[in-house]
Amino acid sequence: MAKIKVQDTEITIITNGDQDFISLTDMAGAKGYESRAADVIKNWLRNRYTIEFLGVWEIIHNPDFKVVEFDHFRKQAGLPSFVLSCSEWIESTNAIGIVVKKGRYGGTYAHKDIAFEFGSAISVSFKLYLIEEFQRLKEAEQKQLGWSVKRELAKINYRIHTSAIKQHLIPQKLTPEQKSYVYADEADLLNVAMFGMTAKEWRDANPELKGNIRDYATMNQLICLSNLENLNAVFINEGLPQSERLEKLNLIAIQQMSVLEHYGNHRMLSDTILA
């Protein structure tokens, strides 16, 4: 849950599924009708254009939307006798763009697309300020997410470069035969350094599996592979022969994977992204 302030009115934003929903109840309070917010929303729902807008939005985003019931409301909208609540709209049409919540943060919430449209019922200036503040909130969240991910990656790299190998070595050290073999494909060079086998050798050993060896790699292995790719590019620029690069990369893979597995950084990174 988050809050933004629009023209001195505090607006609550919640996450419903993976979408942002904005409180229409809070928005209605911007007109000074905090105690009659439900009436403001009901009056908005009576408008024929509102019903058209909600119906088209649901048709685009909701495969379970009941179009027949929507058509009934559309024909009645605008008549003096027409009255409709959000709960009735949701129950009758199986709508998902508006939700009604009870409890501490209760009220009527709508998908941001619909909430922006409701802003027009408050005032044009309110709607524009609402969009601006919402976008500012999203930009701040993205910056925070990027900073958190970079911070955790920095911790991973620090531990990789400073920790000694104290556990079982992952992956296995290459045999003399593997070291002497020439791998024409640089991608296979990395596969051998990391997994101890080429892509073809993996396919031959796993004929029942689809994809390639990297499709079945763990997050830690993918992190290590990314580091190996960068290091291999450096070694190539330095003119190191392939056999020497292979041995160096294998030893680095052993060190990095032992550290990553020990600290469980894949879980730490996942928790950071979900937070």
Image (spheres, helix red, strand yellow):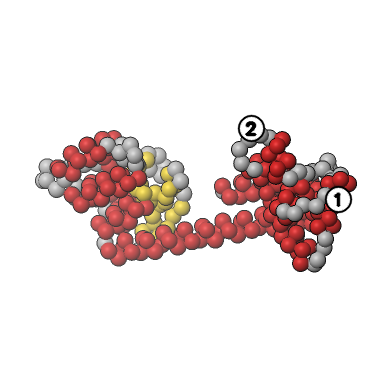
Q: Residue at x 86, y 45 (%)?
A: 177
Q: Residue at x 83, y 60 (%)?
A: 241
- Per the image, label 2 sits on a secondary structure element best described as loop
Instruction: Identify which residue, 76 or 137, lies in the foreground.
Output: 76
Q: If you read the primary sequence from the N terminus, does the residue marked by circle 2 or circle 1 appear first?
A: 1
Residue 101: image location, x then y, percent: 37, 40
The residue sitting at 27% across, 59% down in the picture is 120
Residue kind at label 1, given as amino acid type: Ser
**Residue under pointer 1:** 180
- Using residue 182 as the reference point, say whether residue 136 is left or right of it: left
Q: Is residue 270 left or right of residue 92?
A: right
Q: Position of residue 107 (x, y in %)?
A: 35, 44
Q: Say the numbered circle drawn on residue 265.
A: none
**Residue 71 located left or right of residue 108:** left
Say what amino acid the circle numbered 2 marks: Glu
The residue under the point 36% across, 60% down is 130
Q: Residues within 10 Å of mark 1 (few under 14, many from 20)?
A: some
Mark 2–mark 1 distance (CA, rounded to whole Å): 30 Å
Is 40 in front, or is 70? 70
The image shows residue 138, relative to residue 104, as above or below, that is below
Name the element at disc 1: helix
